[in-house]
Image (cartoon, rainbow, N blue to C red):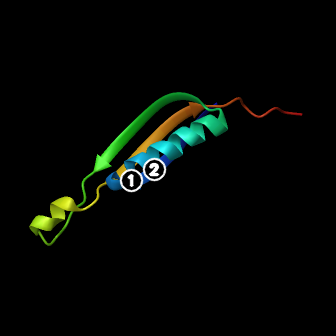
Amino acid sequence: MHQVKIFKSVDSEIADMEYQINRWMRKSGARVISITGNLASSSSSSGSPLSSFAASDIMVIVLYEVDPPQKG
């Protein structure tokens, strides 16, 4: 049975996110099928030069497989 796990963070915390994902994979024993990610740049309505340093959102989607629940 396929399942989805979603992780969300910001680009300034990539190392922490990697640690969290790897830890989850080890502890869960998930059989990972695919990992997909997206980086969404932050938008600032001010248009100031400092807005280019704002953190961007990162989302990682892990598709994994688990055994179906046993009936009985």
Q: Residue at x 65, y 39 (%)?
A: 27
Q: Nearer the viewer, residue 24 or 38?
A: 24
36 up-or-down from 52: above or below: above
- Give the image location of residue 41, x and y in percent: 24, 54
- Tag 1 secondary structure: helix
Q: Quadrant of the C terminus?
A: top right
Which residue position is annotated with label 1? 13
Q: Is residue 21 left or right of residue 41?
A: right
- Give the image location of residue 42, x and y in percent: 25, 59
- Tag 2 secondary structure: helix
Which residue position is annotated with label 2? 16
- Give the image location of residue 55, x and y in percent: 28, 59
Q: Amino acid at mark 1?
A: Glu
55 up-or-down from 59: above or below: below
Q: Nearer the viewer, residue 16 or 70?
A: 16
User: Farthest right residue?
Assistant: 72
Q: Is residue 24 left or right of residue 6?
A: right
**Residue 53 falls in which quadrant of the image?**
bottom left
Q: Residue at x 41, y 46 (%)?
A: 15
70 up-or-down from 6: above or below: above
Q: Amino acid at mark 2?
A: Asp
**Residue 5 falls in which quadrant of the image?**
top right
How many numbered marks have been drawn onto this rendered protein structure?
Answer: 2
Q: Residue at x 81, y 32 (%)?
A: 70
Assess whether mark 1 and mark 2 are in contact (beta carbons under 8 angstroms): yes
Q: Residue at x 77, y 34 (%)?
A: 69
30 up-or-down from 19: above or below: above
Q: Quadrant of the N terminus?
A: top right
- Give the image location of residue 65, x and y in percent: 61, 30
